[in-house]
Amino acid sequence: MASLLDSYEQQYSNVTAEITNKIAKIAKLSGGEKRHMVTNVEKQMEEAKELLEQMDLEVRDIPSKERQKYATRLKSYKTELGKLEKDFKAKLHGASGSREELLGPDDPSHSEDQRTRLLDNTERLERSGRKLEAGYRMAVETEQVGADILENLHQDREKIQRSRDRLRETDSDLGKSSRILSAMMRRIIQNRIVLFVVIAVIILVIALTIYFSTRS
């Protein structure tokens, strides 16, 4: 992201440097050379604005920690371009009163320049339209991915809930089994105690019987 911004910044610096240089030369030119120079400056002004728009889009996608730094630089670039535009307009309208007087009457080459600028603007509009369409498609795809993720999360939540219910049922069954085993153990112990008592009684009776038999 930062490398792309750096590339835009380098292009912007080159374009504005050329604009500054050409604006300084306008007053020294006349006729066709002046018209050609003015047309070039106007094209490069549009190019600089487009670069600023691209940088603005890139800055919005930068993480918030670094965004402020680039936003400040972008603001200074916009201010700089605004000053260049004012300087350019002053060169056009300051001495002769109007752009037409400065550049002279319309001629076929000037009309051709206007048609060229119109075609350039049309191409830029088409590029912007394609970018908007690509952005819209990306937004739709992102929305679809988000919907799929939400659906998967909902299904996972239902699975977890069913697993939790089964665990509760298993825990309940284990509790019942534990209580049954405890009751069985108590009964076994009770039966053993009874058996020992019975055996003891029998042994006592036998002993008594033997004792009284020997006495007799």
Image (cartoon, grey):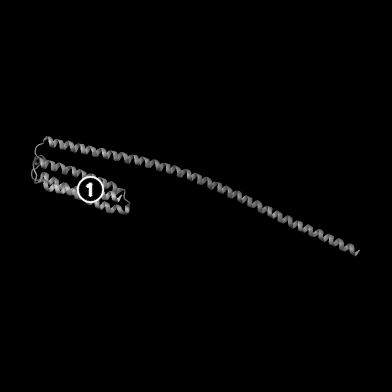
Residue pointed to by mark 1: 11
Left or right of 93? Residue 213 is right
Q: Position of residue 117 (x, y in %)?
A: 18, 38
* Percent x, y of residue 203: 81, 60
Q: Secondary structure at mark 1?
A: helix
Residue 64 vertical position relative to residue 105 in the rendered view, above or below: below
Q: For this view, does 165 lie left or right of residue 28?
A: right
The image quarter in which residue 99 lies? top left
Q: Nearer the viewer, residue 159 or 34?
A: 34
Q: Which residue is at a point 15% across and 47% down the rendered structure image?
A: 86
Left of 179 or right of it: where is 106? Answer: left
Q: Which residue is painted at 19% across and 44% down in the image?
A: 44
Picture quadrant where residue 149 is located = top left
Q: How many marks?
A: 1
Farthest residue toward the bottom? Answer: 215
Question: Who is closer to the viewer here, 50 or 207?
Answer: 50
Task: Please state the horizontal and vertical placement of residue 76, each as a whole percent of the image.
Answer: 22, 52
Crowd tier of the residue under label 1, counting other residues whose Cα lies within 10 Å: few below 14, some 14–19, many 20 or above: some
The image shows residue 78 at horizontal and vertical percentages of: 21, 49
Q: Residue furthest right?
A: 216
- In the image, taking residue 105 as reference, residue 154 lies left or right, namely right
Residue 87 in sight from this viewpoint: no
Residue 212 visible within the image = yes
Is residue 21 or residue 86 the one in the foreground? Answer: 21
Q: Classify the position of the C terminus by image quarter.
A: bottom right
**Residue 68 sits above or below residue 32 on the image:** below
Question: Label 1 amino acid?
Answer: Gln
What residue is drawn where x is 28% and y is 53%?
A: 68
As drawn, the residue found furthest toward the top would be 108
Residue drawn at point x = 26 percent, y = 37 percent:
126
